[in-house]
Image (cartoon, coloured by chain):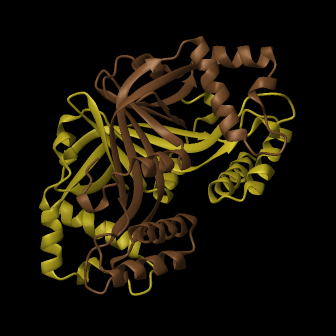
Chain colours: A yellow, B brown
């Protein structure tokens, strides 16, 4: 991903938090040169000194057949995004778009049955935590579990490269920056609100 | 994209509306077998009997160099998405994720200067329409415009294939379906609200 220096995020803790908060990602592989992709929840895990992304797709989704053949699997995570009108700046300029995105690249492996069962348990317990009447992996009947295991293919990707971009008007003057924040709040859409929040957050962490 | 029949959207008018409402998309190409991608606003246009997506990237973003070499450029558009707990169903099951996504494939071309100027004018006028003190392409100074034109590369992709998936619990019973809608509203997050809205909308258009 093209990331001008101003927008680059290098803090690994920040990137990990971002992935956790925006865990519904996209896996892109290629098949005979053609990019194919699936939108699924993904989980970032650190095992010894390596970072892995794990996930699973439907058995009917033939993308799983490409996972071990791809040297550079792309995993994408996106935060909120919003149109930024240049009418909100002091000086004449062209409009742009603010957004947050993390791209990871790595080598993929298909999970064996034990690993897949472990992956499912972690997924269910992650998303059910703190819910009313939570579904618990441990309490699922064998029948439901066996059916599920047969219907999916799990994978892990060992991360070789991290690209993280927060494009949030950091290249604008303070006057423009805070005016963009206010105008985004005025837009009254959920994405604009969330971008405004992120803009306030990064200024605070700046100092 | 793997799309079970239940989730497949074939109405071209619906797909075009979806792209217009979710125009901040992702362009994926490959470079030496490695998928690369950029998140940008994209515009769907029908010229004679063909559909095109147009957009532009920063000149510094070398992805533009891959555009004419790729036979199958992937363009992705995403709607809202939300976790669906299986505790919301009548019978025991595993959790899932609801989402809407459109993938387009096509052949790419770099725009010449006149086409790029036209693309910019359409983009600005699309997003500034109806705003207070709108930026108008026609009123931009030559200086700002020339600087902008030099800093970007425009492209168009002639669409060869459309894949549209609305994965919105259509495979559940009516009781489960409307319970998911209610529970998503209870979640109180913007994405869950939007998914619930989409679920209500597609049931209405069904019947």
What residue is rendered at 30% in x and 23% in y?
B71
Report whether A126 appears left or right of A144.
right
Q: Is residue A20 above or below residue B127?
A: below
User: Residue drawn at (23%, 34%), measured in percent from left and top?
Assistant: A70
Residue at 55% x, 30% y is A3
Q: How many marks?
A: 0
Identify which residue is drawn at 14% across, 71% down: A147
The spot of residue B171 in percent (x, y) is 28, 71
Instruction: Answer with left or right where residue B16 lies relative to residue A48.
Output: right
Q: Quadrant of residue A159?
A: top left
Residue placed most toward the observer, A64 or A108? A64
Answer above or below: position of B136 versus B197. above
Give how far across and how far down residue A9 sits, in percent: 57, 39
Q: Nearer the viewer, residue A79 or A207?
A: A79
Question: Is residue A50 visible in this depiction of the protein?
Answer: no
Q: Is residue A155 above or below residue B136?
A: below
In front here: B137 or B167?
A: B137
Side (left or right) of B32 relative to B198: left
Considering depth in this image, is A178 or A130 the residue closer to the camera? Answer: A178
Q: Position of residue A115 (x, y in %)?
A: 19, 60
Q: Quadrant of the C terminus of chain B?
A: bottom left
Residue B110 as seen in the image, left or right of residue B6:
right
Asked whether the viewer can see residue B192, the reply is: yes
Q: Position of residue A186 (x, y in %)?
A: 78, 56
């Amino acid at each position: 991903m093209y990331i001008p220096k101003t927008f680059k995020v290098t803090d690994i803790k920040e990137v990990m938090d971002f992935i956790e908060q925006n865990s519904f990602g996209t896996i892109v592989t290629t098949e005979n040169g053609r990019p194919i992709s699936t939108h699924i929840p993904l989980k970032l895990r650190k095992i010894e000194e390596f970072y892995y992304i794990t996930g699973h797709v439907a058995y009917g989704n033939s993308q799983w057949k490409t996972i071990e053949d791809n040297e550079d699997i792309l995993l994408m995570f996106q935060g909120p995004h919003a149109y930024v009108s240049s009418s909100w700046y002091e000086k004449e300029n062209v409009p742009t778009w603010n957004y947050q995105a993390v791209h990871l690249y790595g080598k993929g492996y298909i999970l064996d049955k034990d690993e897949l069962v472990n992956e499912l348990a972690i997924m269910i317990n992650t998303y059910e935590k703190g819910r009313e009447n939570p579904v618990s992996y441990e309490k699922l009947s064998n029948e439901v579990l066996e059916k599920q295991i047969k219907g999916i293919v799990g994978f892990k990707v060992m991360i070789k490269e991290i690209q993280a971009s927060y494009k949030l008007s950091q290249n604008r003057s303070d006057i423009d920056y805070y005016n963009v924040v206010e105008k985004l709040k005025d837009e009254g859409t959920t994405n604009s609100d969330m971008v405004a929040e992120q803009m306030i957050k990064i200024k605070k962490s700046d100092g």
